[in-house]
Image (cartoon, rainbow, N blue to C red):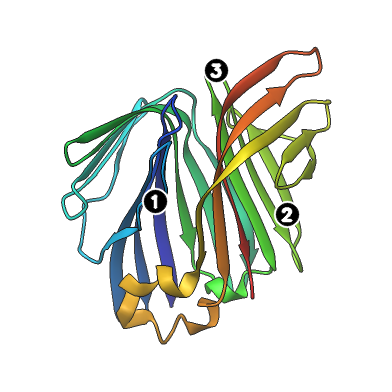
Amino acid sequence: MFSLNKWYFDVTTPDGDVAIAYCAEVRWGPLRQPVSGLLVAPASGTPAPWRFSPREVDEPVLDDRSLRWSSGPLSLSIDYARCVPGVDHRLYDSPSGRIDWHCVVPRGEVRMRIGERELVGDGYAERLSLTLLPWKIPADEIRWGRFIAKDTSVIWIDWRGEHPLCLAFVDGQLEPAVSISESSIRFADGRELRLVEDRVLGDDALGGLLSPLESLRPLLEPITRTRQTRWLSRGTLHSGDGIATPGWAVHEIVRRR
């Protein structure tokens, strides 16, 4: 029996500093492996290399108003004030397994401490639960992203391949999306989110990112060539009445190779 439970956290500051962190646990039969990671990318300069830890960490603490998580091995602590309620969605369900997506914080005020450094800004958090083996996900290409502005947020999920899926949420509410691409998300009511000034945060084969899961590496070999590209972009949400709302977007494409 396979299972993956992964928490994802991020923060973007008004100046464009960004940090991404995660903690996960993989189980496969009798094997069990925790792992956590941290990526920091300053507004000027190149992103620092990923830092990983295979050590056990405490589960995040969630309530109606906040989310908190810390990792001693990564010298990291994160505090979210939740601005809007979360949303849950089952992305896929089959006899082979399921994928459940829990958007815990579509938009939040975040304080992230990394050693002596502190990043304060807007952020996003989610939890992904899989019982489906990752290489059996029926998509050749997956787009995901989140845009956060002062008073609104947009989240999108786009699968291309055997099981197409096109979802967009505005402040946690499902909205019909006409199209999703690397540079824009267009809605049925005429709104459009445009992404510009892309800055690459990472372009990696999953084989390298799976290095902390050494005990499971032979079992995860089928996905080691899958490639993940992630960007930070300036985004502007254009409404049908001419209002333009600026913010930051973190988005990615995962492609099978």
Q: Which of disc 2 and disc 1 is earlier in sequence? A: 1
Comparing marks 1 and 3, which lies closer to the viewer?
Answer: 3
Q: Secondary structure at mark 3?
A: loop
The answer to whether residue 171 is visible is yes
Q: Secondary structure at mark 2?
A: strand
In the depicted structure, whether residue 65 falls above or below residue 138:
above
Left or right? Give the position of 147 relative to 110.
Answer: right
Q: Secondary structure at mark 1?
A: strand
Give amino acid for label 3.
Asp
Residue 89 pos. (x, y %): 59, 47
Left or right? Give the position of 178 relative to 38.
Answer: right
Kindly indicate the quadrant of the structure image that contains residue 208: bottom left
Residue 151, labelled with which disc?
A: 3
Crowd band around label 1 with a 10 angstrom C-alpha radius: few (<14), some (14–19), many (20+): many
Give amino acid for label 1.
Trp
Determine which residue is flagged by label 2. Answer: 165
Residue 163 pos. (x, y %): 74, 64
Kindly indicate the quadrant of the structure image that contains residue 197: top right
Distance from Cα at disc 3 to Cα at disc 2: 27 Å
Give amino acid for label 2.
Leu
Distance from Cα at disc 1 to Cα at disc 3: 24 Å
Determine which residue is flagged by label 1. Answer: 7
Question: Which sits in the foreground, 138 or 205?
Answer: 205
Q: Residue at x 72, y 13 (%)?
A: 243
